[in-house]
Amino acid sequence: MLKLKYPRDLKKFENYELGFSDWFLIDQQLINAFAQLSGDDQWIHVDTGRALNEMPDGKTIAHGLLSLCISPTLGKNKIHIENLKHTLNYGIDKVRFISPVKVGSFIRLKSKILKVIIREDNSVLVRIERLMEIKGIKKLAMYAETLSLMYAGD
């Protein structure tokens, strides 16, 4: 874990590898819950019977947006900033869903601090590269660059 005193201290860590998360299981229960929440109940995600006959390997696949939504959970506890008031999600750039995540797969996230900008209001804009891997598969599941605005505590 990278431990810092203030958000602005991240500037010294541009291109810093934050490492890997633990492996995380994508199961049908999680896929179904996301389908219900998002309203995306396309059969390739939720119909296990049909997938058995019509999908490669006979398995449903996770939503690409499910993979993206799990990335904050997998990226947790990589940075600790002592004097941090709060962090805001500022956006996501360059999102690509490269390989489907089949039900029963294990995924993990590799994170890297790409760029840190100290803004005029003293907030800190942090761009983090997120590479999502599938255990046993060479091609990435997902690539994204997340943007966060950090504000120092008083």
Image: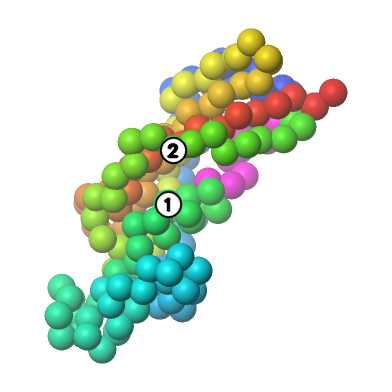
Q: Relative to 119, is 20 on the left or the right?
A: left
Q: Is residue 45 above or below residue 98?
A: below
Can see residue 128? yes
Q: State whether the magenta stretch is mostly helix, strand or loop.
A: loop
**Which residues fall within the magenta stretch?**
75-82
Q: Quadrant of residue 120?
A: top right
Q: Quadrant of the N terminus?
A: top right
Q: Residue 75, how many percent across, how many down?
A: 53, 46
Verify CB contact (< 8 Å) between mark 1 and mark 2: yes
* SS of the residue under disc 1: helix
Front residue of 49/140: it is 49
Which residue sits at x=29%, y=69%? 61
Q: Which mark is residue 92?
A: 2
Of residue 4 and residue 119, the one placed in the foreground of this image is 119
Q: What residue appears at the point 50 percent right and 69 percent down from the top-left corner?
A: 37
Residue 60 can be seen, yes or no: no
Residue drawn at point x = 74 percent, y = 30 percent: 84
Q: Is residue 124 magenta?
A: no
Depth order, front residue of 108/143: 143
The residues bearing labels 1 and 2 have C-alpha atoms spaced at a distance of 10 Å
Picture coordinates of residue 103 (x, y %)? 33, 73
Q: Amino acid at mark 2?
A: Ile
Q: Residue at x 42, y 51 (%)?
A: 68
In the image, residue 73 sits, relative to residue 92, either above or below, namely below
Q: Is residue 11 above or below residue 94?
A: above
Q: Amino acid at mark 1?
A: Leu
Q: Is disc 2 placed on a helix, strand or loop?
A: strand
Label 1, on which residue?
Answer: 68
